[in-house]
C-alpha cells in the first residue's frame, strides 16, 4: 500500500494521508541550525548540537507516536453555519488534535516541508524552512476562507522550549523546574516575540525566540496555563476557551504560544509568519539596559525585521530552491530505471547531505543525546557528499583528523559543538583510522587539491602536536601494523565496522555497554574485515604517494598491502568465502566450521573492493572473488536485500558480544544491514556483473519499495539502516531511517560503480557496469569545474568501453582534463563489444 507519491518534477515526496505507519520525516537547515519535521509537524529544532543546544522539546518513545512539535491550532470563533460549529478547533497538520481533514497533504522537499489541509471550508497550509545561512526556522501559514460567508477564526501557535541540554532537560527535574525564564514583547506595535532565556542570567549568551508577524490577541509561556491541568496537546484549555491567558513562566515548563485573531471574507487569504530561532549576544552586551537582567534585543532586531517581511521570506525560499538545484546539478542521470533516476538525482543526494550534517546524532531513531559525530561514520558520509560542497568536506576532514590520537588510532566520536573527542566512548575501534584515508582519497580524487595533505593538524586537538595531514594518514596504517594478531591479521580491538562484534568484551552484566566494557587486552582476536580495509587503504596510500612522486614510499605501501593480502589468502579464506574473524581463543568466526554465523557479508564486500581474490589470480593469489559472490547470493541474499550473516545467532554468546544480543534477523544479528549491501553491489560491478549489481541495488532502493509501504513502513524516499532479515518475524520491515552509511555507500555504488562515473586521482573515469538490457543512459557531471555531458550507448554485450571526447576517440577510459578555458565536454561512450 502507498501513503503518497513522488513528485519528481518538484523534487518532493507527497504524503496524502497523515497516519503513515511511522512518522515520515524531513530535515530543515543546512549548516548550523537544524530541524527535524514529521509529516504531521512533529519534531524539534537545535543549533549545531542536538544534545547541547536543543531549542524545543521532543518526547521520544511516547504515545501517541511523535509527540512534541510545531503546533498550530485553528479555532472557529463564531461564524455561524454548518461548516464548523463555533468553538470547534483543529490542527491543519492533523497532529496533535487528529481531526478528520480534507485534502491533507504533506510535501517533503529538499530543505523544506509544506503541510496543508482543509477543515470546515477553511484551508490552511504551512511551509516550514530554514533560510540559507540563518539560525531560524520560518513557518509560513496561509489561511483561506472557502466558505460563502465571513469567517472569524483564532490561530494558536505552540512550541515547548527545551532547557538547552536535552539530556539534562529530560532527567534533572529538581533543578530544571526552577529555572525557566522568558521575556515577552507583545505590545500593540511590537512583533509578538517570545524570548526563551533560561540560564541567560548566568553563563549562557544565547536565547531562543519565537516571533509572529501579526498583532497578538494574547500569548502563553507557561505550559500548564496553556494546556490546563491534565490536558494534552490535543485539547489545550486556551484553544478550547478561545483565549490565551498571558501566562509568564517562572520555572516549570516554558512554552511559546501566540494567539492571533483572523477575520476572513469569503475567498480571502491571509498569511501569518512565525519565526523560531536562536541568537547569541556578545558577552559584554548581553543585557539592555546594561546592568539589568533584560535581553539586549538590538542585535536580533534586524533578523526579526527581515524575516517578518513576507517578500523577504519568499526570496529566502527561492534562494533555498536555487541552492538545491545547483547542488543537484553536480550529478544528474537519465537511465531507463525511474528508481535509479529519482534516488540519484534527488533523494539519495539529499540524504547524503543530511548524513554529512548529522552523522548519527538526531533522527527519529537517534535521540540526539547519545552520540556526536562518529569518526568512521563521518568519514564514510563524506564519500557521498564531497562532490557537492568540497570545501565543507575539507573542513570536516581536518576536524576529524584533529581528533586522531598520536598512536594513529582515533576517538570513536566527537561532539560537534566542541569538536573534542568523546572520552566516555574513547578509542580502540581498530578499523576507525583507515576510513580517514578513504575520505581523504575521495577528496583528492574529486578536487585534485593536493595541498590538503600539507595542512598541519594536531592530534587529539592538542596545541603543539600539529603534523601534516599526510603524516596522520601514515599513522593510520601504522596503527594496524602495530597491532597484528597471531595470523598476521589486524587485531579487532573493541570492534571493527560491526560495532556489535565484540570479541574482547565478555559481558555478563545486564545493561553494560558492549563497546566500552572491554575486559580483555585483545592480543588474539583478529578481523578479516580490517585486513581487507587495510589493503584498500594501503593501496590508496600507495597511489597518493606515487602521485606525489614518492616512489619508494609507494612501493612500501604496496608491499604492506601484499603482505596483508597474503595473510588473508592464507588465514582469511574459508574455502567458499572470506572468513569474518578469529575470536579470543583463536576460533574461527564466519566459517563453515561454525554452528551459527557461518558466513558474513562484510569481508566478502570489503576484500573484493580491495581487489583481494579479484581476477584470475594475477596478483599471485587465488581468484576467490567470484566464489565469494556466489556464496553471498546463495546464503545471504533475500528479496528484501542481503543479510549480514547466516545462520543468525539464536542465543547469546559471551565471546561474541552485542551481535548475539539481538533477536535473530534484527540489526547486527543477521538483519539486512543496508550499509553493507552496496559493498556487494560494487564487488559485483568490479566482477563485471551489471545485472546482479543493479538487481541488488533495487532490492533496498526505497523508491522501488514504495508499493510495499505496509511491510517496509519507513519513508519510501530515504534509505534505512536496517531491514529485518529473513530470520525475523517481520522480514522486510525497515528501521532507523535517514542516518546511515547506506546513503553514502549506495550513492557511490550506483553512481561510481554501476553507472561507472568515477573520479580518480588522474581525472574522471567512465566504466559503467549496467544491466545488459539497458540501451544506455545519459548523465551530466560537473567535475573539477568542467561540465561533462555523458551519453552511453550499448553497442554489444559486456562492459568494454570506447570513449569519444568532443568527437575524438581516446584510448583510455579516463577523460583528459580539457584546456583551462573549456568548461563543457561532450563524452560519447560505446558500451560493450559490438557483435560480441
Ligand atoms: C547498534 C549499532 C551501533 C552501536 C553503536 C549498537 O547498539 O546496534 O548499530 O553501531 O550500537 O553504539
Ligand atoms: C551503526 C554505526 O553508526 C556504524 O558506525 C557501524 O559501522 C554500524 N552501526 C554497524 O555496526
Image: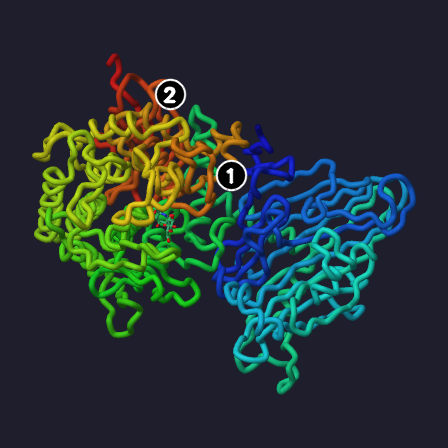
**Quadrant containing the N terminus in the rendered view:** top right
Residue at figure coordinates x 63%, y 55% from the top left: 138
Percent x, y of residue 561: 13, 45
Pointer 1 with pointer 2, Cβ within 8 A: no
**Residue lying at the far bottom of the rendered structure:** 291
User: Relative to residue 657, is residue 352 drawn left or right?
Assistant: right
Q: Residues within 10 Å of mark 1 (few under 14, many from 20)?
A: many
The CA span between labels 1 and 2 is: 30 Å
Q: Secondary structure at mark 1?
A: loop
Instruction: Say which residue appears at 57% left-offset and 74% top-offset.
Output: 175
Which comes before the other along the chain, label 1 or label 2?
A: 1
Asked whether the viewer can see residue 305, the reply is yes
Residue 420 placement (x, y as % from top left): 36, 67
| In the rendered image, the vertical position of residue 190 relative to residue 376, given as above or below | below
Nearest to the observer: residue 375 or residue 594? 594
Q: Position of residue 38 (x, y in %)?
A: 59, 46
Image location of residue 196, percent across then percent down: 63, 69
Specify the farthest residue to the top. 835
- Which tag is nearer the camera, tag 1 or tag 2? 1
Q: Check disc 2 and report its element: helix, strand or loop.
A: loop
Q: Is residue 363 above or below residue 463?
A: above
Residue topped by disc 2:
774
Q: Is residue 447 at all visible to an observer of this figure?
A: no
Residue located at (23% from left, 38% from top): 590
Q: Is residue 409 left or right of residue 205?
A: left
Q: What quarter of the picture does the C terminus occupy?
A: top left
Quarter occupied by residue 211: bottom right
Q: Is residue 90 above or below residue 702?
A: below
Quadrant location of residue 622?
A: top left
Q: Which residue is mark 1?
A: 714
Q: Residue at x 14, y 57 (%)?
A: 482
Amino acid at each position: 500500500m502507498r501513503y503518497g507519491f513522488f513528485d519528481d518534477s518538484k523534487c518532493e515526496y507527497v504524503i496524502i494521508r497523515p497516519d503513515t505507519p511511522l512518522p515520515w520525516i524531513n530535515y530543515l537547515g543546512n549548516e548550523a541550525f537544524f530541524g527535524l519535521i514529521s509529516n504531521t509537524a512533529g519534531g524539534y529544532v537545535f543549533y549545531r548540537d542536538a544534545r547541547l543546544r536543543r531549542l524545543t522539546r521532543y518526547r521520544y518513545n511516547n504515545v501517541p507516536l511523535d509527540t512534541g512539535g510545531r503546533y498550530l491550532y485553528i479555532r472557529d470563533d463564531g461564524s455561524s453555519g454548518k461548516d464548523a460549529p463555533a468553538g470547534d478547533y483543529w490542527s491543519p497538520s492533523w497532529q496533535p488534535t487528529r481531526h478528520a481533514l480534507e485534502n491533507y497533504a504533506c510535501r517533503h522537499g529538499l530543505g523544506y516541508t509544506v503541510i496543508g489541509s482543509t477543515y470546515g471550508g477553511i484551508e490552511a497550509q504551512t511551509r516550514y524552512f530554514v533560510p540559507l545561512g540563518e539560525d531560524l526556522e520560518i513557518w509560513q501559514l496561509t489561511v483561506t476562507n472557502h466558505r460563502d460567508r465571513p469567517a472569524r477564526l483564532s490561530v494558536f501557535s505552540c512550541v515547548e522550549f527545551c532547557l538547552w541540554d536535552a539530556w539534562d532537560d529530560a532527567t534533572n527535574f529538581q533543578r530544571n523546574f526552577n529555572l525557566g525564564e522568558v521575556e515577552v514583547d507583545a505590545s500593540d506595535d511590537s512583533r509578538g516575540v517570545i524570548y526563551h532565556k533560561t540560564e541567560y542570567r548566568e553563563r549562557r549568551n544565547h536565547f531562543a525566540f519565537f516571533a509572529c508577524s501579526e498583532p497578538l490577541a494574547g500569548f502563553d509561556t507557561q505550559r500548564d496555563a496553556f494546556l490546563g491541568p491534565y490536558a494534552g496537546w490535543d485539547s489545550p484549555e486556551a484553544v478550547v476557551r478561545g483565549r490565551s491567558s498571558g501566562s509568564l513562566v517562572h520555572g516549570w515548563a516554558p512554552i511559546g504560544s501566540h494567539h492571533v485573531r483572523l477575520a476572513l471574507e469569503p475567498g480571502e487569504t491571509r498569511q501569518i509568519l512565525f519565526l523560531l530561532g536562536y541568537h547569541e549576544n556578545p558577552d559584554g552586551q548581553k543585557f539592555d539596559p546594561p546592568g539589568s537582567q533584560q535581553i539586549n534585543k538590538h542585535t536580533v532586531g534586524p533578523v526579526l525585521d527581515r524575516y517578518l517581511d513576507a517578500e523577504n521570506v519568499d526570496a529566502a525560499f527561492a534562494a533555498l530552491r536555487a541552492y538545491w538545484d545547483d547542488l543537484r546539478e553536480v550529478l544528474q542521470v537519465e537511465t531507463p530505471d525511474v528508481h535509479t533516476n529519482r534516488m540519484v538525482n534527488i533523494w539519495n543526494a539529499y540524504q547524503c547531505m543530511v548524513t554529512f550534517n548529522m552523522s548519527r546524532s538526531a533522527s527519529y531513531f537517534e535521540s540526539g543525546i547519545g552520540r556526536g559525530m562518529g569518526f568512521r561514520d563521518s568519514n564514510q558520509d563524506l564519500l557521498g557528499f564531497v562532490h557537492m560542497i568540497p570545501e565543507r568536506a575539507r573542513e570536516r576532514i581536518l576536524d576529524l583528523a584533529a581528533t586522531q590520537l598520536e598512536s594513529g588510532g582515533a576517538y570513536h566520536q566527537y561532539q560537534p559543538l566542541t569538536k573534542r573527542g568523546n572520552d566516555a566512548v574513547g578509542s580502540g575501534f581498530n578499523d576507525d583510522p583507515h576510513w580517514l584515508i578513504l575520505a581523504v582519497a575521495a577528496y583528492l580524487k574529486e578536487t585534485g587539491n593536493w595541498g590538503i595533505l600539507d595542512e598541519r593538524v594536531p592530534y587529539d586537538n592538542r596545541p603543539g602536536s600539529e603534523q601534516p595531514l599526510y603524516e596522520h594518514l601514515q599513522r593510520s596504517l601504522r596503527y594496524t601494523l602495530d597491532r597484528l594478531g597471531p595470523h598476521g591479521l589486524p587485531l579487532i580491538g573493541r570492534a571493527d565496522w560491526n560495532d556489535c562484534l565484540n570479541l574482547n568484551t565478555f559481558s555478563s552484566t545486564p545493561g553494560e555497554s558492549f563497546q566500552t566494557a572491554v575486559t580483555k587486552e585483545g592480543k588474539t582476536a583478529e578481523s578479516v574485515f580490517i585486513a581487507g580495509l587495510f589493503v584498500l587503504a594501503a593501496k590508496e596510500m600507495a597511489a597518493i604517494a606515487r602521485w606525489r612522486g614518492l616512489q619508494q614510499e609507494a612501493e612500501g605501501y604496496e608491499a604492506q598491502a601484499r603482505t596483508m593480502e597474503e595473510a588473508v589468502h592464507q588465514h582469511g579464506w574459508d574455502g567458499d568465502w572470506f572468513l569474518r574473524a578469529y575470536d579470543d581463543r583463536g576460533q574461527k568466526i564466519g566459517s563453515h566450521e561454525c554452528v551459527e554465523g557461518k558466513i558474513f557479508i562484510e569481508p566478502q564486500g570489503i576484500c573484493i573492493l580491495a581487489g583481494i581474490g579479484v581476477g584470475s589470480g594475477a596478483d599471485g593469489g587465488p581468484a576467490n572473488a567470484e566464489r565469494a559472490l556466489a556464496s553471498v547470493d546463495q546464503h545471504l541474499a533475500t528479496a528484501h536485500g542481503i543479510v549480514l550473516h547466516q545462520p543468525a545467532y539464536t542465543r547469546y554468546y559471551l565471546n561474541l558480544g552485542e551481535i548475539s544480543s539481538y533477536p535473530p534477523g534484527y540489526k547486527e544479528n543477521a538483519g539486512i544491514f543496508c550499509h553493507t549491501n552496496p559493498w556487494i553491489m560494487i564487488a559485483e560491478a568490479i566482477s563485471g556483473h551489471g545485472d546482479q549489481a543493479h538487481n541488488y541495488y533495487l532490492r533496498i532502493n526505497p523508491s522501488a519499495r514504495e508499493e510495499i509501504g505496509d511491510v517496509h513502513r519507513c519513508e519510501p524516499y530515504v534509505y534505512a539502516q536496517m531491514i529485518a532479515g529473513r530470520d525475523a518475524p517481520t522480514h522486510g520491515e525497515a528501521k532507523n531511517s535517514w542516518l546511515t552509511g547506506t546513503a553514502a555507500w549506495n550513492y557511490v555504488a550506483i553512481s561510481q560503480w554501476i553507472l561507472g562515473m568515477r573520479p580518480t586521482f588522474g581525472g574522471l573515469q567512465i566504466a559503467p557496469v549496467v544491466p545488459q538490457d539497458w540501451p544506455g543512459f545519459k548523465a551530466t557531471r560537473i567535475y573539477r569545474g568542467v561540465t561533462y555531458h555523458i551519453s552511453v550507448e550499448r553497442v554489444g554485450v559486456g562492459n568494454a568501453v570506447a570513449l569519444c571526447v568532443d568527437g575524438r576517440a581516446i584510448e583510455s577510459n579516463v577523460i583528459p582534463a580539457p584546456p583551462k578555458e573549456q568548461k563543457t565536454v561532450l563524452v560519447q561512450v560505446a558500451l560493450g563489444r559490438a557483435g560480441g
